[in-house]
């Protein structure tokens, strides 16, 4: 199978490309120049984020729609930010989400931009949780303070922390592309019992053999990241991969402890 991978040189794209090639697929990469290390999260940048995601997706969707031989599958990766943060609600792929903040608005519009008319191409959306893996993603930002024994819960710590190992996210995307019965929304999160931020911090510290009891106060998070980005760290969602499991996907890292041990090995 020939596969076009957008963002193919990034953290997720690299893992996906390696898996696809290992499974014998021919891969073509689409990438963009990396942005600056430090980004000012202001209204202008938010508009750029929206336009870059939406315009690129719309261009690809139009190309697919007009193609004389459209692809068999069109798989999009968005995020669990679609679901509203809650300490009590549980979300599966059929749960409502929507337009309640910048990130949910981004996901809603992004998925709408990818929607194709008709059924000539199988369409799949994977809503990813926090991706854990070596050399990038969330772990890349947290590893040093945790190695120094300075890690701990963010804010109150009781907010949910939906996560997935990079190998499983790449696996779900490959499964979605290969399996003709897979379509619609899949939650790209681990099937393990729901993890809170405090539980994640404790498990990460244990994997490193380091203490992890120094909380990062909410006011500091808001001051460093700004109000809207801080929400992603201080609030969370209890997300379950009901439809993902129903498709027959077999997780390589369903449990947090094993996932973190592989990441830090």
Image (cartoon, rainbow, N blue to C red):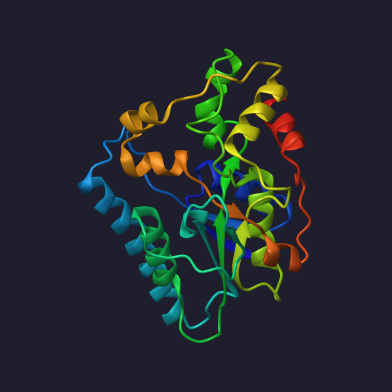
Residue at the extreme front: 88
Residue at the extreme top: 148
Q: Which of 36 and 185 is in front in this view?
A: 185
Q: Is residue 1 visible?
A: no
| Residue 63 relative to residue 254: left or right | left
Q: Residue 192: percent from the left, percent from the top?
A: 73, 48
Residue 139 occupies quadrant: top right
* Residue shown at the point (50%, 31%) measured from the top left: 154
Q: Residue 181: percent from the left, percent from the top?
A: 71, 76
Q: Which of 208 and 31 is in front in this view?
A: 208
Residue at the extreme left: 44
State how many labels appear: 0
Q: Nearer the viewer, residue 45 or 1?
A: 45
Quarter of the N terminus within the rendering: bottom right
Q: Nearer the viewer, residue 134 or 68?
A: 134
Q: Residue 6: percent from the left, percent from the top?
A: 48, 55
* Residue shown at the point (53%, 37%) measured from the top left: 137
Residue 123 occupies quadrant: bottom right
Quarter of the C terminus within the rendering: top right
236 up-or-down from 3: above or below: above
Q: Can residue 178 be seen in this view?
A: yes
| Residue 44 relative to residue 216: left or right | left
* Residue shown at the point (72%, 57%) measured from the top left: 24
98 up-or-down from 137: above or below: below
26 up-or-down from 206: above or below: below
């Amino acid at each position: 199978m020939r596969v076009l991978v957008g963002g193919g040189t990034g953290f997720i794209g690299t893992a996906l490309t390696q898996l696809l090639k290992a499974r014998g697929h021919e891969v073509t990469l689409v990438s963009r120049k990396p942005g600056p290390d430090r980004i000012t999260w202001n209204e202008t940048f938010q508009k750029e984020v929206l336009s870059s995601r939406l315009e690129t997706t719309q261009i690809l969707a139009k190309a697919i729609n007009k193609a004389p031989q459209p692809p068999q599958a069109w798989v999009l990766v968005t995020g669990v930010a679609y679901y509203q943060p809650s300490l009590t609600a549980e979300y599966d792929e059929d749960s409502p989400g929507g337009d309640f903040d910048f990130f949910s608005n981004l996901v809603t519009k992004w998925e709408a931009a990818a929607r194709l008319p008709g059924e000539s191409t199988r369409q799949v959306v994977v809503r990813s949780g926090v991706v854990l893996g070596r050399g990038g993603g969330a772990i890349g930002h947290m590893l040093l303070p945790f190695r120094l024994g300075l890690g701990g819960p963010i804010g109150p710590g009781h907010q949910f922390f939906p996560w997935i190992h990079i190998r499983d996210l790449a696996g779900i995307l490959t499964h979605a592309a290969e399996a003709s019965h897979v379509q619609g929304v899949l939650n790209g999160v681990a099937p393990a019992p729901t993890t809170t931020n405090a539980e994640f911090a404790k498990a990460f510290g244990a994997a490193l053999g380091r203490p992890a009891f120094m909380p990062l106060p909410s006011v500091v998070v808001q001051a460093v990241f700004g109000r809207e980005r801080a929400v992603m760290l201080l609030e969370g969602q209890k997300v379950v991969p009901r439809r993902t499991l129903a498709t027959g996907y077999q997780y390589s890292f369903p449990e947090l402890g094993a996932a973190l041990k592989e990441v830090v090995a």
